[in-house]
Amino acid sequence: MAHAGLSTAHDTHSGGAAGRGAAGRRRWPLAVGAALGGCALFVTSTAPAAAHGAGPGRDTHYVSLGDSYTSGPLIPRQVEAACARSDHNYPSLVAAERRVTVFKDVSCAGATTDNMWKAQGTNAPQLDAVRLDTDLVTVQVGGNDMGFGSIIATCARLSSEDPTGDPCRRFYASSGTDRLTLAVAQTAPKVDRVLRAVHARAPHARVLVVGYPDLLPDDGSGCYPSVPFASGDFPYLRDTEKRLNVMLRLVADWNRAEYVDTYGPTRGHDMCKAPADRWVEPLQPSSPAAPAHPNAQGEEAMARAVLERLSEGRARH
């Protein structure tokens, strides 16, 4: 897993200082590092460019940015094959419920924060969809930056070596520093740049950062071999996802965006549960969905969480 440095200077991706002004350099709160398990996270950058003044505020022009947890791979009906995008993913459900006038879902399976600025196959840079008149943006990104897919593959492969132990945790901590905690910390400035770019392009938009749903049993129990992780790695991977969500919440707050918790509403419907009860499919899905991804019920649960956040009114910062 390639690691970027923990410091980042002025956002070179977002096309200059539009919407940012001449604000001084900032430093992330020390609380971020503590929240990620003692992994120091010092990021210098320009101040956030949110300008929550007057604006439409009616969610009439909605743009959805995100990765496969947003796009909904294999969930019927697939409307964009290259990005594995479903018309029953949570952005589509939110758009239908809110009866928005303009809806652009540019989420794409496999997307990283880089794909906010760079094309992904035939999918244009996702930020191209965000315009001055955009008044609602949801963002769900970061999992692929820290390597969700490779982590799952690595932990599944190592489980056979010590199915009752924690070979995956030992592997990622072999250098003396937990590399997954570090990966979460290193993803923070990338998400930060995305949110600043969104605010620069749509200064009056309401911006929601959507967290990731409950993938593994919250109580730390396992379900080997249905989900082929060693028993001691279930709580380790659960805690890693929680760190990712904590980071997303903190970065959202720092950028005057709103965080949508999808972990809490999906707790108890993880990939270890019986087919009738799970909203996230295991590595061998029984419902139309990608492995280790939300099924249609999971997308519905995330839509409800987003709609609940929207119904509460814009958060004050």
Image (cartoon, grey):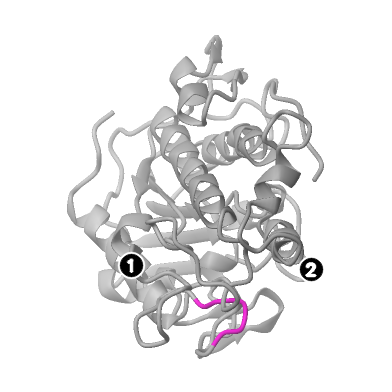
Q: Is residue 234 above or below residue 249?
A: below
Residue 99 lies, with reference to residue 44, above or below; the image says below
Residue at image location 40% in from the left, 74% down from the top: 298
Residue 39 on the magenta segment: no
Could you say whether the residue bearing mark 2 is in a helix, strand or loop? loop
Residue pictured at 30% horizontal, 33% vertical: 53
Amino acid on which disc 1 is placed: Gly
- Which residue lies under the disc numbered 1? 268
Neighbours of disc 2 within 10 Å: few (<14), some (14-19), many (20+)? few
- Residue range corresponding to the magenta coloring: 281-285
Q: Position of residue 302 (x, y in %)?
A: 36, 66
Q: Nearer the viewer, residue 14 or 221?
A: 221
Residue on which the image places disc 2 = 121
Q: Is residue 42 left or right of residue 208?
A: right
Amino acid type of the residue that numbered disc 2 sits on in the rendered structure: Gly
Q: Residue furthest top?
A: 24
Compared with 145, 86 (above or below) is: below
